[in-house]
Image: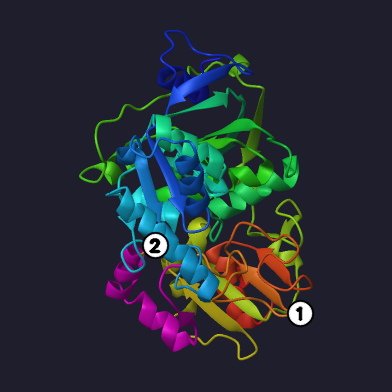
Amino acid sequence: MPTIAAKILSEKAGKEKPVHAGEIVDCEVDYIMVNDITGVPAFEVFEELGNANEMRTEKVVVIQDHYVPNKDVESAEQARALRSYARRYNIENYYEIGRGGICHQVMIEEGFVAPGRLIIGADSHTCSYGALGAFSTGVGSTEAAAAMATGRLWFKVPETQKFVINGELKRYVMGKDIILHIIGEIGVSGSLYKAQEFYGRAIENLSLSDRITISNMAVEAGAKAGIIPPDEKVFDFLRGRVRGEYRAVYADGNEEDYEEVVEYDAAAIVPTVAEPFSPDNTVPASELDVLIDQAYLGSCTNGRIEDLRVAAELLKGRKVNPAVRMIVVPASEKVFQQAIEEGLITIFLEAGAFVCGPTCGACLGGHMGVLAEGERCISTTNRNFIGRMGHKDSEVYLANPAVVAASALKGRITDPTGL
């Protein structure tokens, strides 16, 4: 089964021949990432293992991002505990508030992610790194602790699905629409414990940012990983940035190696919205006429500079609807700084949007954008479950940055194509 996933797991397990789906392998991992929610439990379990002097600190990355800035005493205590652990174990790869950003963006920006690597993170959207040709997946805090102690973790080799998207995408159709379209067809369990691989001219033409969005949401279909074969766009991005050496891994190209192969016509994909309360409850944005209270642009899914540019283009010289509050959250301090330099932040402020530094807060219903009872939000985030961004009787609609910006202007969910 020489798919990308199988090849990476084979190599990290030290196997001479490719492993097969269903096989259990013990692999050397390249990096282990934890954040302010998952990190403290991981360190606690690590200490219970009795390996306090044997942590593989060179593999550990610690990032404060979910309750940033701290919203209450409890989150402040949690952040302080994580900070203390990072200092106790002299973890060099520690990213404090104001010096990092949302964990997945930081992992990619700071050169931890590269083709052929095996990376685990105590956060489900760790699968984002597959956009650069890595096998990356979310694990629990206990598994992260075990890897901290040993540098290794066991995996069951997944079956792999191949998604081929050929043709040209229409204006305002982005990576978010591709993955929502796929999830809408296969369902939230359509890739359960499988790896997804993405191919085709439409994928090749996407920016790295849009590819990250696709890999980020692979887990919303239950996937273990969402992998895109690396190309010159990836290599250019990593030049002068990547930490250490890496080797790109590619599938052999045999159709029989995949559990299934699904093809799509890019021209048939339109700006898409996932209605409450599931990412697979998709519908074309043009078919909706739903009043909104909040428009949210940000998160590890769509908070990169390319996403901000798309929204700013639509908002420039216009005003957010007076019945709507718009919140803009760059995915990292570096993205924030670049947005300032490009004048995007000024555009957002002049349009009447609220802009803040990088945080996961609103995405998980923590703070910095929590919804009240009955409120509706059009959001570039990745989940719209019941109560995801606040009150259990609020509603979240998932969409790309262009749809979010257009909706903020109109006060209702809007297809930007007709704006």
SS type, badge 1: loop
Residue where numbered disc 2 is placed: 101
**Is 91 placed above or below 52 here?**
below
Q: CA distance from mark 2 to mark 1?
A: 29 Å
Q: Residue at x 27, y 73 (%)?
A: 341
- Residue type at mark 2: give it: Gly
Dominant SS of magenta comes to helix
In the rendered structure, the answer to whether residue 33 lies left or right of residue 292 reads: left
- Residue type at mark 1: give it: Glu
Quarter of the image that includes the N terminus: top right
In the rendered structure, the answer to whether residue 242 lies left or right of residue 45 reads: left
Residue 64 inside the magenta-drawn segment: no
The stretch of residues the image draws in magenta is 333-359
Q: Residue at x 43, y 88 (%)?
A: 350
The picture places residue 115, in percent across and down from the top left corner, at 37, 33
Q: Residue at x 31, y 64 (%)?
A: 99
